[in-house]
Amino acid sequence: MLNYEDRYINHADIPETRARARRYKAFKEATGFIEILNKESHKHVEICKYVRIKTHGHLNHITFLELGYMTIVLTEPYQGKLKDFNCDELYTVEIPVDIAPYGGKCSASLETNPGTKSFLITTRLKQRQLDEVLQRLEEQSEKMALWNFIREVSK
């Protein structure tokens, strides 16, 4: 299984991937998450199953993450709302736009909204811990440029 950077950033050097690289770096620094490359990870697969079966939620661009003993699924769907993931067993938060890793296709217009929303999903038991991570993401997001900002490199 390829890691996040190889799937969504390293495949091309274009404005879209440069903006993603900037956001993903800030996302990793703010969260401290470790990416899990085992797509058969039982805990992660169970979270995905709950989303699909119990909520009929839509998962896309799925990444498995961990922080200590907290199991997290990052999903970045083009369709879906936070309410799609309401489930007694799960706790879901939406990542602030300016630090959300994927974002979809980049637009030159800084007023454009991203094509995707990014969600972190964990078990209800880890709600407090995920709320602490979300607080760090919100604080870092306030310091960042707009989601699709690309700084031109002078030659």
Image: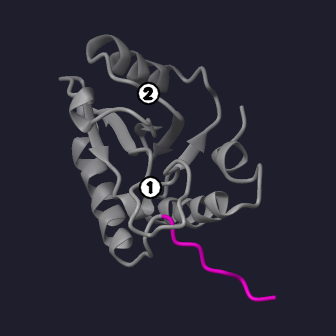
The residue positioned farthest toward the top in the image shown: 53
68 is higher (above) or lower (below) than 14: above
Looking at the image, residue 35 sits to the left or right of residue 152; the answer is: left
User: In the image, which residues are magenta?
Assistant: 148-155
The residue positioned farthest toward the bottom in the image shown: 154
Whole-percent x, y for residue 96 in the image: 34, 58
Can residue 112 be found in the magenta stretch? Answer: no
Q: Residue at x 50, y 65 (%)?
A: 148
Residue that badge 2 annotates: 59
> What color scheme is it?
one colour
Q: Residue at x 23, y 42 (%)?
A: 127
Residue that badge 1 annotates: 100
Looking at the image, residue 62 sits to the left or right of residue 52; the answer is: right
Tell me whether circle 1 and circle 2 mark residues in contact (CB < 8 Å).
no
Whole-percent x, y for residue 50 in the image: 34, 17
Whole-percent x, y for residue 110 in the image: 44, 70
Q: What kind of residue is marked 1?
A: Ala
Q: Residue at x 72, y 37 (%)?
A: 2
Q: How far apart are the two marked residues, 1 and 2, measured between alpha carbons? A: 16 Å
Tell me which numbered mark, 1 or 2, is placed earlier along the sequence.
2
14 is higher (above) or lower (below) than 71: below
Mark 2, other Cα within 10 Å: few <14 / some 14–19 / many ≥20: some
Q: What kind of residue is marked 2?
A: Leu
Q: Residue at x 55, y 24 (%)?
A: 41
Q: Which mark is residue 62?
A: none
